[in-house]
């Protein structure tokens, strides 16, 4: 059985396209932000427990001074934050902050950041849209 060059090229192209599609699949698995209600922001005053500067999303753990609960606040990627004036040192454990947050629709202590004011420095950082 002889395979023509044309048949071989078509098969190779198909394999290459299949590999590209497989590599792109993780990008399509990104989650939605519909779990957060940005139309009803809440204000949290508290102390930074941790600022996780990691891909695909940075996150902030803040201890609410009223309730003592630790809120897990999601942000965007380090690259987007950098373009908006943030650095990995923008928030440090122990910093006192006031945050505007789009809370979880379920009511749990988590949300997505809208902006944060560092009460120690007076600096306000905004989340990129």
Image (tube, rainbow, N blue to C red):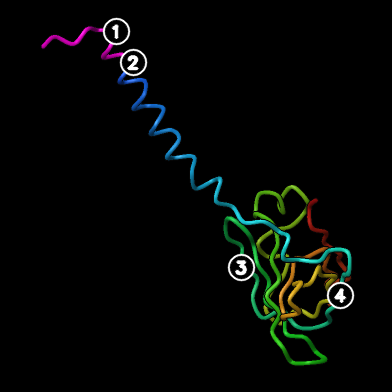
Between the residue at mark 1 and the residue at mark 3, the CA separation in whole angstroms equals 52 Å
* Viewer-nearest residue: 19 or 114: 19
Q: Marks 4 and 2: which is nearer the front?
A: 2
Which circle marks residue 6 in the picture? 1
Depth order, front residue of 108/128:
108
Which label was assigned to residue 16?
Answer: none
Which is in the foreground here, disc 4 or disc 1?
1
Q: Which mark is residue 42?
A: 4
Above or below, 26 relative to 118: above
Percent from the top left, x then y, of residue 122? Answer: 89, 70
Marks 1 and 2 close (CB-CB < 8 Å): yes
Q: Real-space Cα distance between discs 4 and 1?
A: 63 Å
- Quadrant position of the N terminus in the picture: top left
Whether residues under marks 3 and 4 lie with C-beta atoms below 8 angstroms apart, the answer is no
The residue that mark 3 highlights is 52
Q: In front: mark 1 or mark 3? A: 1
SS of the residue under disc 2? helix
First in sequence, mark 3 or 4: give its number: 4
Number of callouts in the render?
A: 4
Residue where numbered disc 2 is placed: 10
Is label 3 or label 2 in front?
2
Alpha carbon separation for disc pair 4 and 2 = 57 Å
């Amino acid at each position: 059985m002889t395979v023509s060059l044309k048949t071989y090229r078509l098969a190779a192209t198909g394999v290459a396209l299949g590999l590209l599609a497989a590599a792109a699949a993780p990008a399509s698995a990104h989650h939605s932000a519909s779990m957060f209600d940005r139309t009803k922001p809440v204000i949290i005053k508290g102390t930074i427990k941790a600022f996780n500067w990691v891909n695909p999303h940075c996150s902030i753990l803040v201890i609410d001074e009223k309730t003592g609960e630790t809120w897990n606040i999601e942000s965007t990627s380090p690259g987007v934050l950098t373009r908006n004036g943030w650095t990995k040192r923008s928030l440090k454990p122990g910093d006192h902050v006031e945050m505007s947050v789009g809370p979880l629709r379920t009511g749990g202590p988590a949300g997505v950041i809208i902006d944060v004011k560092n009460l120690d420095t007076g600096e306000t950082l905004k989340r990129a849209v």
